Image (spheres, grey):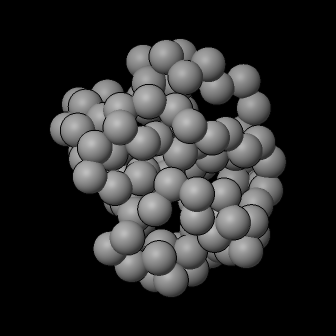
Amino acid sequence: MTKYFTDNNFDSDVIEASKEKPVLIDFYADWCGPCKRMAPELDQFANRIGDKAIVGKVNTEESREISAKYRIMSIPTLIIIKNGREVDRMVGMQNVDMLNKAIKNFL
């Protein structure tokens, strides 16, 4: 299941949680066409990975603090967080296979 991260829950739901398992974050905006096409891929990936990782989204329009902290310049941007820090970044549309390959090293 895909979660939604905000400025309010980011520390607990991402930073702290990433100490136990990797967290994949999709930075997106509602008006972004590629982001809309990415959503079903992200949901499929979340269903496939199950409880091995946490999968979620950050709306860049609503969570500007997080977006600035991670210097999001283009969307969709996907970041993997492990042990509280960024370990991988992908920019642009990604499919399920690409997401699986990216997160495999951090499981």
Q: Quadrant of residue 75?
A: top right
Decide which of 28, 91 is in the foreground and name it: 91
* Residue at position x 39%, y 78% in the image: 50
- How far across and down, in percent of the image, does residue 86 sit? 52, 32
- How far across and down, in percent of the image, does residue 2 sit? 41, 65
> Relative to residue 56, is residue 26 drawn left or right?
right
Residue 51, can we see it? yes
- How far across and down, in percent of the image, does residue 51 sit? 32, 73
* Residue at position x 42%, y 18% in the image: 65
The image shows residue 97, relative to residue 107, as above or below, that is below
Decide which of 57, 48 is in the foreground and name it: 48
> Relative to residue 13, is residue 55 drawn left or right?
right
Q: How many marks?
A: 0
Q: Quadrant of the N terminus?
A: bottom left
* Residue at position x 37%, y 70% in the image: 52
> Relative to residue 13, is residue 96 drawn left or right?
right
Decide which of 80, 40 is in the foreground and name it: 80
* Residue at position x 64%, y 26% in the image: 72
Residue 31, can we see it? no
Decide which of 52, 76 is in the foreground and name it: 52
The image shows residue 107, relative to residue 9, as above or below, that is below
The image shows residue 37, relative to residue 45, as above or below, that is above
- How far across and down, in percent of the image, does residue 97 sit? 73, 74
